[in-house]
């Protein structure tokens, strides 16, 4: 049974990429808190399924987050339905691998757009609501990939390390309005995509060798930390980069 944070009942939350993977676990965790959740995701089928499951508590807005005007319109759609946004979880990303010598300028820009740029503009779209309320919480999803020096995905690791700088600048600029901004950096989390694409018996062996905790980490491990970070229980925590990796680092 997960902890319940009473201040999150009725909170208006946006989860980007909230229809699949870790984002879906985050969406479900906020719904369990009694929050009203706007899910912005490109996966229309999964989003519609969640909307059917959760009815009035969840609004799915299909949206390609690399399209910034569409992102801003989607935030407004959530605001029109549920009211001012109190919590933003910048979760969406795409961890496609790429060989450095084959990366074109257009491909690079596309990776930055899907892994970094929307985090800034989603924050920009909700910050005025939070300023007016005198409080708010933003949690940006980072990654330990750049911390451990992972190769084969330079545009992804560059984006994910930049999430830390983005987080700390926003925390500095908006702390005076009672707005907290933190980053949560997952280790290796066993989402459907990871299991399908990357997890092999050899890599699983590495998990058990490198993690202090000898078990698979799952999306709910991240969702629980994020809900805590968004709650008043974390009311003095801002400007932080919190690693959840079972002790890999
Ligand atoms: N799974 C891991 O091991 C792991 C490790 C470190 C960090 N992370 C981070 O956690 C977050 C979630 O990762 P995940 O593993 O759940 O990813 P995932 O690929 O399983 O899910 C990503 C979600 O984002 C959505 N999405 C992707 N591109 C989009 C776009 N252009 N517009 C709108 N929605 C889009 C997808 O439809 C999907 O629902 C990411 O920020 C990722 O970098 C994950």
Image (cartoon, rainbow, N blue to C red):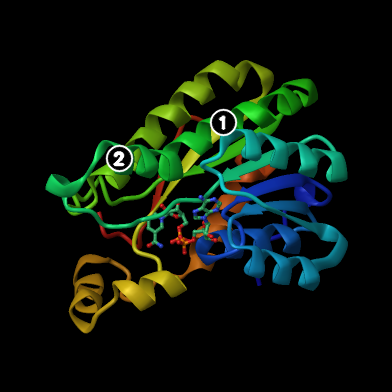
Disc 1 is placed on an element classified as helix
Q: Residue at x 66, y 29 (%)?
A: 125
Picture coordinates of residue 148 (x, y %)?
A: 21, 50
User: How many numbered marks appear?
Assistant: 2
Disc 2 is placed on an element classified as helix
Q: Quick check: is the Cβ at mark 1 less than 8 Å away from ligand 1?
A: no
Is disc 2 surrounded by few (<14), some (14 to 19) or many (20+) residues within 10 Å? Answer: some
- Left or right: 95 as drawn, with respect to 23: left
Q: Which residue is mark 1?
A: 121
Is residue 246 shown above or below 120?
Answer: below
Q: CA–CA distance between discs 1 and 2?
A: 19 Å
Q: Residue at x 64, y 69 (%)?
A: 46
Q: Which mark is residue 108?
A: 2
Q: Quadrant of the N terminus?
A: bottom right
Is residue 203 shown above or below 13?
Answer: below
Is residue 194 shown above or below 57?
Answer: below
Please identify the quarter of the rendering in which residue 60 is found: bottom right
| Residue 66 seen in the figure | yes
Q: Which mark is residue 218?
A: none
């Amino acid at each position: 049974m997960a902890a319940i944070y009473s201040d999150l009942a009725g909170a208006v939350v946006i989860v980007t990429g909230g229809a699949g993977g870790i984002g879906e676990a985050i969406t479900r965790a906020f719904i369990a808190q009694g929050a009203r959740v706007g899910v912005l995701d490109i996966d229309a089928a999964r989003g519609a399924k969640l909307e059917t499951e959760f009815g009035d508590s969840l609004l799915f807005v299909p949206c390609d987050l690399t399209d910034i005007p569409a992102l801003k319109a989607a935030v407004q759609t959530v605001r029109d339905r549920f009211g001012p946004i109190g919590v933003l979880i910048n979760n969406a990303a795409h961890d496609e691998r790429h060989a450095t010598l084959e990366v074109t300028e257009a491909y690079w820009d596309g990776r930055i757009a899907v892994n970094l740029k929307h985090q800034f503009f989603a924050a920009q779209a909700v910050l005025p609501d939070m300023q007016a309320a005198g409080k708010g919480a933003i949690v940006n999803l980072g990654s330990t990939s750049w911390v451990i020096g992972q190769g084969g995905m330079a545009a992804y690791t560059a984006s994910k390390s930049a999430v830390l700088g983005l987080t700390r600048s926003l925390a500095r600029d908006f702390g005076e309005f009672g707005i907290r901004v933190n980053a949560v950096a997952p280790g290796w989390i066993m989402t459907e995509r990871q299991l399908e694409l990357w997890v092999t018996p050899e890599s699983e062996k590495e998990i058990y060798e490198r993690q202090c905790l000898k078990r698979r980490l799952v999306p709910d491990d991240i969702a629980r930390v994020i809900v805590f970070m968004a709650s008043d229980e974390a009311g003095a925590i801002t400007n932080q980069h919190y690693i959840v990796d079972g002790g890999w680092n």
